[in-house]
Amino acid sequence: MKKAVKIVLGVLGALGLGLIGLILACHFKPGLSDAIADKLYKNRSKTEAQATLSEEEEAELDRITPDDLAGNGSGEEESAADPEEVSDLPGPDEPQSAEEPAEEPAEEAAPPAPLKTLADYGLSQENVLNNIDEYFDDCYEQLSAAKGNDTSFYNVMRDSMLGQKVLQSYDDESYREGFMNKFMDDYKVESCGWSIDEEELEGGYILVKHTFTR
């Protein structure tokens, strides 16, 4: 260990003596310091020259594009999608919507047919009946006018309420006592066909249509 320390001290001493000698030499010989400085400057200039690019190299470097650095050189041909075609494609999260058929215009409902009037059936205000008894009497008179033969005729009720009473008389068969039994007895009718139908007229009147057959 002591021997190693002595060697290190010896080396340091030699370096120190060499440095002192160099300083003394430069002091007594100024030209020597200039030569050393010139040598150091040339070495530095050479290093800077190696680090500096020439004009041709700088021009070549300017021509390099970001695509060249990314590996997409002009010599490589890649097929790019048309921007218009790409814009028409749905996105990854956008559902492809099927073309919806055009809706057909809704057909407008036809306006209701206008109601007929008393005059359309050759009737007048005098023919309007005001109660169910008047209806029974009118039916008997018109059936008797045909003398028991096949016939058709009309009655006019003053309103829908009276028209409803006429229909009810056929539901409960009260019309038989009202006029039909008497008519069949008077004209010796054993069996017959009988039908009625109602129609609303202008003014709220109800027309009752009758058909009698033997």
Image: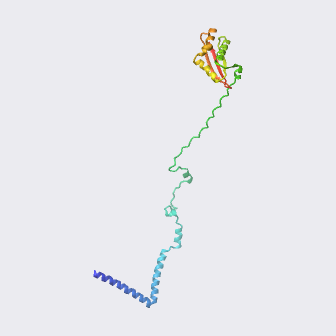
Looking at this view, name the residue that lies furthest to the bottom: 28
Q: Is residue 122 visible?
A: no
Compared across the picture, whether 147 is left or right of 26 comes to right
Task: Give coordinates of residue 161: x percent, y percent.
Answer: 63, 23
In the figure, 76 relative to 152: above or below?
below
Task: Give coordinates of residue 173: x percent, y percent.
Answer: 58, 16
Q: Observer-nearest residue: 190 or 172?
A: 172
Task: Give coordinates of residue 111: x percent, y percent.
Answer: 65, 31
The quadrant where residue 3 appears: bottom left
In the figure, 10 relative to 91: above or below?
below
Q: Is residue 47 visible?
A: yes
Compared across the picture, whether 85 is left or right of 114 comes to left
Q: Observer-nearest residue: 63 or 104?
A: 104
Q: Residue at x 45, y 85 (%)?
A: 36
Which colouring convention does the figure follow? rainbow
Q: Observer-nearest residue: 8 or 52?
A: 8
The quadrant where residue 182 appears: top right
